Amino acid sequence: MNLDFSDEQKQLRDQVRRFLSEKCTSAHVRAILEGPESYDKALYKGLADLGLLGAAIPEEYGGSGLTHLELCVIAEELGRAIAPVPVSSSIYLVAEFLLLAGTRKQKETWLPQLASGEAIGAFASSEGQGRTTPASVTASVKGGKLTGTKWPATDGDVANVAVVTARDEKGALSLYLVDLSGAGVRRETLETIDPTRSQARLVFDGAAAELLGAKGDGWHIASQVLDRAAVLMAFEQLGGADRALEMARDYALERMAFGRPIGSFQAIKHILADMYVSATLARSNCYYGAWALVSGAAELPVAAATARVSSTTAFQHCAKNNIQVHGGMGFTWAFDCHLFYRRSNALAVSLGSLSTWETHLIERMSAGNAESAA
């Protein structure tokens, strides 16, 4: 079994890394953090022009026709650069919803726009604080009109189309496509720890809604897509964790104290070693998730939850300890440590909190053990 990426995929990684090193420096990230824009439009267009947004979208729908393995490679590089772009919402989620459950017309309408960057997507499921479950969804659709409030919705303030969970006339939970430029939609940008990944409150008051997938199958479809997105998000978190580790290592080799690099002190060595172990464990689990994703393996639910839990833990751990290694300077605005700390905490609650995915992992492993015992 080959547990590494191919030479072509490594070449893709190098190409994306070079592009982001020029177009997504910390100065670009700070411009979004401190400015009025919700994302870097020039960077997003550049990713689209390179065919990266459509990597896993079939060519017949305007994509590059590659696989999810290439998308995993791209996701990791976006995470390293903490790129301020709506790729996760548009590509990991909305594009996957369309590929899995969309009609041909829905695919032809939206997938080419998502691949070209002309349209941005958002997944609107949460209705406030707490774990999102089928029972927590109160938004409803009657006569093709959607009513309800969804928040937080990542990139909802800039999205053109949203996939929304809502109840139909019979109370069954279904998925709906909503053109956010239409009537009956109000948006409010929310304040978050990481303004480079915007969140919004979406208020629907009679907005036109088009059924996506079969009626009453909304939660089943959403669970499948969230597993796919969890693997891709895990790679993004892995990239951030690796970069935070590199920043800490480089600073430990450069910073002098008592006539020697601080990296020579045992306390710093232990911190860096713990960061390395955390990131390496996450990489192993991400590769397992990537294999399950691209092969359509039955192990995907467990693999996705495992990758998500370990990568969330690794990114938060590495981002926090990167600040610790930098000492007092690490807490200042001038250093870039806080950019990774912000992103690590923002991604930790995307797609559901860490505790939610830990619960998923326990439930799925328990179910598998019960089936094996039977």
Image: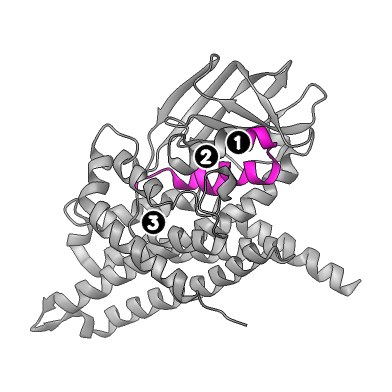
Q: Residue furthest front?
A: 60
| Chain-order first, disc 1 or disc 3 | 3
Q: Nearer the viewer, residue 94 or 130?
A: 94
Q: In the rendered image of this protein, does residue 191 appear above or below residue 168? A: below
Residue at image coords 45%, 46% = 87
Q: How many numbered marks are there?
A: 3
Amino acid at dot 1: Glu
Q: Nearer the viewer, residue 44 or 205?
A: 44
* Mark 2 secondary-structure assignment: helix
Q: Give the main secondary structure of the magenta stretch.
A: helix
Mark 3 or mark 2: which is in front? 2
Q: Residue furthest left?
A: 259
Q: Is residue 105 left or right of residue 269?
A: right
| Residue at which label 3 appears | 78
Q: Which residues, given as a range, are shown in magenta?
A: 84-106
Residue at image coords 26%, 59% = 21
Between the residue at mark 3 and the residue at mark 2, the CA separation in whole angstroms equals 21 Å
| Residue at which label 1 appears | 108
* Mark 1 secondary-structure assignment: helix
Between the residue at mark 2 and the residue at mark 1, the CA separation in whole angstroms equals 7 Å
- The reply to whether callout 2 and callout 1 are in contact (CB within 8 Å) is yes
Q: Is residue 79 left or right of residue 148?
A: left
Q: Is residue 254 left or right of residue 362?
A: left
Question: Quick check: can you spot residue 352?
Answer: no
Q: In the rendered image of this protein, does residue 49 appear above or below residue 200? A: below
- The reply to whether callout 3 and callout 2 are in contact (CB within 8 Å) is no
Q: Nearer the viewer, residue 238 or 143?
A: 143
